[in-house]
Image (cartoon, helix red, strand yellow):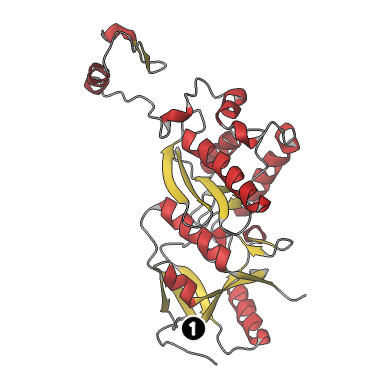
Amino acid sequence: MGNTGNKVLSTEIVTRYIFNEKHFAATKKRVKYPAFMPRNGETSVFRIINLSSKKIWDIGKYVGSLGNRMLQARGDIGANDVFALELDIEPDTQKHPLHANIIGWPAFKGKIKLVAIKLADKAQLHLTPS
Amino acid sequence: MEETLDYRTNNFDRSTISINEYLGIVCSRAVFPKVDTLPEIGEIKSDTRANLEKLAPSLGSQIYSWFESDLAIEKLEEVYRQCSFDDWDGYDAAAISKETYFEARRLLRLIPSSCPLPDILPEPEGEIGFEWYRGKGFSFVISVGGNNIITYAGQFGENNEIYGSECFRDSMPQIILYSLERLFQESNGKHRK
């Protein structure tokens, strides 16, 4: 397993598991901005550095099973890309040792949207293996 | 002087009243006129589609087929159906309310026919967003949440970005029409390079 509970380094990759089909475009291979928009000031992500592909998908399926949601895809993004947008990634290991939240979102809704657009542009889409 | 102001339209006779006098009249009655964010583009006299298109001529004369069909409404209804309950995204998202749905429907009708159909997307705070995506670094998004406010954000190439909010009355705010025009101009330029 990779880092657990420690400060997230800029060299790490975090992933956003996607459970809604409207939040990505499979044909264009892109994540759409609402996938990264925060709820109550946080965007839930998982730290995936040094994990195998299978392990990464297993975590996503586990997260989906908690809310009875089917995992559709995931969006990977470099922590450095998150930090570059003046956001922070805070480990939150109560639910899972690799869980973290993107925090530090702007107060203004329009700016939040713009930042989410930029994150989505940087993210790499992976579709759930069939 | 006061009689020259038509409160129904917020129009006044510029030849017989100074701007300070006009503002004095308006402020004393606590009635505020529509303020155009980009007044140089021109005035919207009504919410007719024809007038909206006059404001964004560079979007082209093409009329997209979605505009004449029920496709957009069907897509909007699908989003509402799928997301009208809490936690629709697995991350405790807020349900999309009926008010938000109807507001989005009203907004959809104000999109110029010369614009392609946007992606209609549910947002975690219960808003509905319309996204026009032209490639990395070139996109524009507007959203509503049932409170008569349109939130918008966009990027038009490197170091060219915009965000803000506008009151949603019965016409599309000019800043949004201008931004759509800009998106298609800038992204067309990018594709030509």
B189 or B134: nearer the eye?
B189
Nearer to the camera, B137 or B164 = B137
Q: Residue at x 35, y 57 (%)?
A: A107
Quadrant including the N terminus of chain B = top left
Return the x and y of residue A115 as percentages of the image width and height. Answer: 46, 60
Q: Quadrant of the C terminus of chain B?
A: bottom right
Residue B61 visible in this rendered orientation of the protein: yes
User: Among all residues in the image, which is located at the extreme bottom?
Assistant: A1
- What residue appears at the point 52 percent right and 33 percent down from the top-left corner? B172
Q: Which residue is mark 1?
A: A11
Place of residue B49 in the rendered image (x, y in percent of width and height, measured from the top left): 61, 26
Read off the chain for label 1.
A
Q: Nearer the viewer, residue B28 or B4?
A: B4
**Mark 1 falls on what kind of element?**
loop
Residue B23 quadrant: top left
Q: Is residue B158 left or right of residue B16?
A: right
* Residue B32 falls in image quadrant: top left
- In the displayed structure image, the side of residue B103 where residue A83 appears, left or right: left
The answer to whether A86 appears left or right of B82 in the picture is left
Left or right, B28 with respect to B123, comes to left
The kind of residue on which mark 1 rests is Thr
The one nearer the camera, B15 or B11, is B15
Percent from the top left, x then y, of residue A46? 53, 78
Residue B90 visible, this orientation: no
